[in-house]
Amino acid sequence: MIMCGIVGFTGNKKSAPILLEGLSKLEYRGYDSAGIAVLNDGTIKTQKTAGRIKSLMDNTNGGETINGSVGIGHTRWATHGAPTTENAHPHLSGNKKFAVVHNGIIENYSLLKENLINDGFEFLSETDTEVIPHLLEKYYDGDIKTTVIRVTNMLKGSYALGIICADYPHMIIAAKKFSPLIIGVSSDCNIIASDATAIVNTTKDIIYLEDGEIAFIQPDNIEIIDENQKKIQKEITTISWNVAAAEKDGFEHFMMKEIFEQPKSVANALNGRIKNKKVVFENFKLSKEELQRINMIKIVACGSAYHAGMVGKYILEDMTRIPCEVDLASEFRYRNPIVNDKTLTIVISQSGETADTLAALKKAKSSGSHILAIVNVVGSSIAKLSDDVIYTYAGPEIAVATTKGYSTQLAALYLFSAWCAQNLGTISANDLEYFLNSVKSLPQKIKETIDCCGNIKKISKICIDSSSLFFMGRNLDYAVALEASLKLKEISYIHSEAYAAGELKHGTISLIEKGKIVIALSCYSDLSEKMSGNIKEVVARGANIISCTNEKSPVISNQYITIPDIDSRLIASLEIIPFQLFAYYVAYYKGLDIDKPRNLAKSVTVE
Ligand code: F6R
């Protein structure tokens, strides 16, 4: 689980109403199921739903019908396993002595699960999390501290954990590694949560847990040990911000928060998928032999997902030498495409529910094509109907204009291209290693790109009064130009067009006149000379040039946006960042509703 929410409470009053209130404060993060577990008289009771927190509230009279002053709660955004009640947290051990809520991903869960099944443990969910309560039961020696230390030492990956144990009637246990977890400290109770939103109504005094730390929390005592199991004293920080600010992590808009989340989201998309210098997709049905029979790849999607597909086409064709076409799903579904059992259809969708993409998927499937979905929302309709799924693990995206959704789709496409190339033998071992190392560097490079976008505000101000502007580029620069133009259009309401730079002189150049803003994307160094030529053509007609380049591809320009250098196959991932920020700031300076642009919906489930 990536963006799930955790709450835990121990105090001298009923815990369930406080847990439910805390969970409702975490709803903004997006979730598909929720649950609480409360300990009372040595028995742990759970209440779960594959729906909204409101239904938990309705079933329990706001938590009042559940007795017990110690409990944990969770909002789940599905990653391992569909959004069902069985997969919702908390998860119980077989003997019902332990209940666990978890954010993060347990990377070695398959092996742990296999061993536990061999030991006779029965699993009720498809989640990675369920191994944890079973491990606690297996290794419990009567001492909760040694048991939790032992079990957390066995977990690989990331976790924020909330645990209760029937033998410890006043205690919640919190453990953190690579997923956020905090403790709210109060005079008559203590609370844990994945973010301060769930806590600030009760207390503003917070202890921030660090990686490797475990806290044993009772109403009147908090004992924290560090990664070396040494008891430590932690500082209490008093926070000053309010709930609305907390939801957006201090950002004014979800879009900006999500732009800044991209290094983390892309890291999640890559997590565990590059092993021993190779790409690994667990449980992939598409075999090497089937891949070798494929003679055409069709990528089908809408909007930004289609633009991610445009990037995918350049990379896939280059790395696999299989012809690849990108189609708008709304066009594909109503024409007579050539698709058969030698076609691999890749459908890309953040939501997994886009009506046109779903219809296109069904059409390709009925023609015998193998369907690979690149999807963010686990258990979505597109994921369910596909033969194979590469989940992008971007976490819930709240802003209507996609940013981290698109970036993680690119990451999935790079991995898939490399996976094909390694299986088809169309890439040398050296180049594969170089490519995958570059892919691994993306989270850090994206962060550097965000950091070096200092002049975007200034450039945005230059553009706010334009009624129309042009983007142009070649090859991957062109694919990014399409997405950059859409970002600007959808949130700033400024008309723009994206052109393949070589195509300009076949008509559109007639629109270039004195002062017209032309944004030249020129990061693809192999073609920077060609781009220089195109820039000169529009400059000669009075255009005002804003260029985006890296150090390898300089061009003349009135304003420069510079991005870090990277393997040229991966430039789209860096080059889009300044244009997400550009669209944001243009809309911001125009005073528009950035997270909810007019006429648009996040998930387009109708045709
Ligand atoms: C633009 C945007 C849309 C979506 C499109 C497809 O910022 O978000 O263009 O990319 O509606 O949506 P999904 O990816 O959910 O299929």
Image: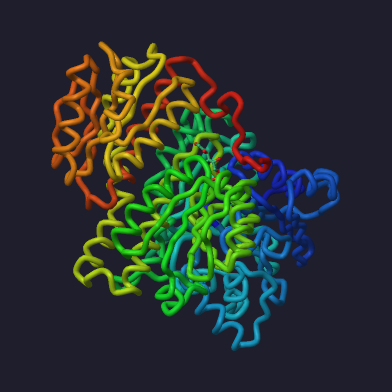
Instruction: Say if 489 sits above or below 210 in the image.
Output: above
Question: What is the tally of numbered marks visible in this picture?
Answer: 0
Query: Residue 68's image quarter?
Result: bottom right
497 or 334, which is in the foreground?
Answer: 334
**270 left or right of 103?**
left
Instruction: Say if 95 sits above or below 530 in the image.
Output: below
Picture quarter with the N terminus = bottom right
**467 left or right of 569?**
right
Picture quarter with the C terminus = top right
186 or 303, which is in the foreground?
Answer: 303
In this rendering, does residue 308 appear at all? Answer: yes
Query: Residue 260's image quarter?
Result: top left
Q: Which residue is depicted at the point 43% across and 63% down?
A: 296
In the rendered image, residue 436, in percent from the top left (x then y), is placed at 28, 62
In the rendered image, residue 405, in percent from the top left (x then y), is placed at 48, 45
Image coloring type: rainbow
Instruction: Say if 224 sits above or below 584 in the image.
Output: below
Q: Which residue is depicted at the point 26% across and 30% down?
A: 520
603 or 63, which is in the foreground?
Answer: 603
In this rendering, does residue 233 appear at all? Answer: no
**34 left or right of 451?**
right
Q: Which residue is depicted at the point 56% across and 43% down?
A: 184
Instruction: Say if 144 sits above or below 518 in the image.
Output: below
In the rendered image, residue 254, in percent from the top left (x then y), is placed at 51, 33
In the rendered image, residue 332, in percent from the top left (x then y), is placed at 55, 49
